[in-house]
Image (cartoon, grey):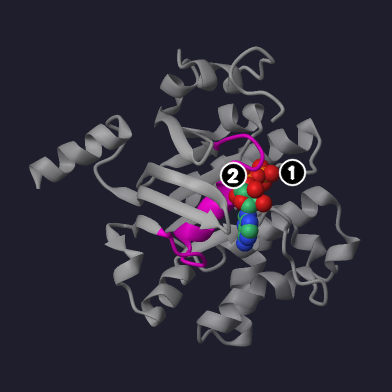
């Protein structure tokens, strides 16, 4: 046990004793494109972790590996210490109910109003009756400031409202792990700051592990207690947020300071 704890300790820089997610040597090819190239990543249980990285570096593909939508060609994905490759299909499906995802493009059902969008996971995965569903959904809509928008359809929402509806839906099953894929995309800086505060608030209230995938540094600085920086299909550096945000690694320093000078170019 103590050797396992020290291993976790060294993986996370002492942030936690257990891991919510561990990626071990994962490779993924799509045709000839080698997207994940031996990625190693450890997300501490209970943390609010940001996964940073430039566009097209494989962040969304990584999320699909954590939820078991995509299988690695090599390597192992572990969620709360359990390897996905050793789970049966029904165990993977069950695991997915414990991982809430706020999708990059919102992915709200356009034919359903906000209330029904948020209610959907409850109707799929629980035996709650209509009045119980109503209570749970109302609570989650209130928490994201959408109490008055339940009967609106996605096309009638602003970008920020869509994000908040997506967050409410990701949280409604009270998952142990929540993953937010670029929650700031399409939002102005003020809405992004407000959303960052909302993410922090929900994480503090609900507990569990929250993983925020983004390339927005103001958002990352506002929410993170743990950070990992991805580039070219691997993790360049990871650890407590204050360590990463003050890193002397050339690539990480360029990325966190949004500098034009450094190894990252337009290619
Ligand atoms: N199913 C797929 N088939 C083929 N290529 C894919 C597939 N999914 C992703 N890719 C490719 O993998 C690469 C990484 O994509 P990904 O969406 O993970 O990037 P990202 O880091 O999330 O970028 P962004 O910040 O722009 O969202 C891209 O080149 C993309 O075209
Ligand atoms: Mg993406």
Left or right of residue 171: residue 16? left
Q: Which residue is mark 1?
A: 185
Residue 25 against residue 14 in the figure, above or below: below
- Residue 208 seen in the figure: no
Q: Of helix, strand and loop, which one carries label 1?
A: loop
Tell me the residue at 47%/69% (across/down): 96
Q: Position of residue 48 (x, y in %)?
A: 47, 41
Magenta residue check for 209: no
Boundaries of the magenta span: 52-73
Label 2: few (<14), some or many (≥20) within 10 Å? many
Give the structural element (helix, strand or loop) at label 2. helix
When asked about the image quadrant of residue 141, the answer is bottom right
State the image coordinates of residue 5 (x, y, percent, origin top left): 17, 42
Distance from mark 1 CB to nearest ligand 1 atom below 8 Å: yes
- Disc number lying in front (1 or 2): 1
- Identify which residue, 153 or 79, lies in the foreground: 79
Query: What's the mark number on residue 199?
Result: 2
Query: Where is residue 175 drawn, in percent x and y?
Result: 47, 63
Please tell me whether residue 214 is drawn above or below residue 139 in the rendered image. above
* Above or below: residue 104 compared with residue 265: below
Mark 1 crowd level (few <14, some 14–19, many ≥20, 10 Å Cα): some
Mark with earlier residue (1, 2) = 1
Q: Identify which residue is drawn at 45% across, 56% down.
A: 177
């Amino acid at each position: 046990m103590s050797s396992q704890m020290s291993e976790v300790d060294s993986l996370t820089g002492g942030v936690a004793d257990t891991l919510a997610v561990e990626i071990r040597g994962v490779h993924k090819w799509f045709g000839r494109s080698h997207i994940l190239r031996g990625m190693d990543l450890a997300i501490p249980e209970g943390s609010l972790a940001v996964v940073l990285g430039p566009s097209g570096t494989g962040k969304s593909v990584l999320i699909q590996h954590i939820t078991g939508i995509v299988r690695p060609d090599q390597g192992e994905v572990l969620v709360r210490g359990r390897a996905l490759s050793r789970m049966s299909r029904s165990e993977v499906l069950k695991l997915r109910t414990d991982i809430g995802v706020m999708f990059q493009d919102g992915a709200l059902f356009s034919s359903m109003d906000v209330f029904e969008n948020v209610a959907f996971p409850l109707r799929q995965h629980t035996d709650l009756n209509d009045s119980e569903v109503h209570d749970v959904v109302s609570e989650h809509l209130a928490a994201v400031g959408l109490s008055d928008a339940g009967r609106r359809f996605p096309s009638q929402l602003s970008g920020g409202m869509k994000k908040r509806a997506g967050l409410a839906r990701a949280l409604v099953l009270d998952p142990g792990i929540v993953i937010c894929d670029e929650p700031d995309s399409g939002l102005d800086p003020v809405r992004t700051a407000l959303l960052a505060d909302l993410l922090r608030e929900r994480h503090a209230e609900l507990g569990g592990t929250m993983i925020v995938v983004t390339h927005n540094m103001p958002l990352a600085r506002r929410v993170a207690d743990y950070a990992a920086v991805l580039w070219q299909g691997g993790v360049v550096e990871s650890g407590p947020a204050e360590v990463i945000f003050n890193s002397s690694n050339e690539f990480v320093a360029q990325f966190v300071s949004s500098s034009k000078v450094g190894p990252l170019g337009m290619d």
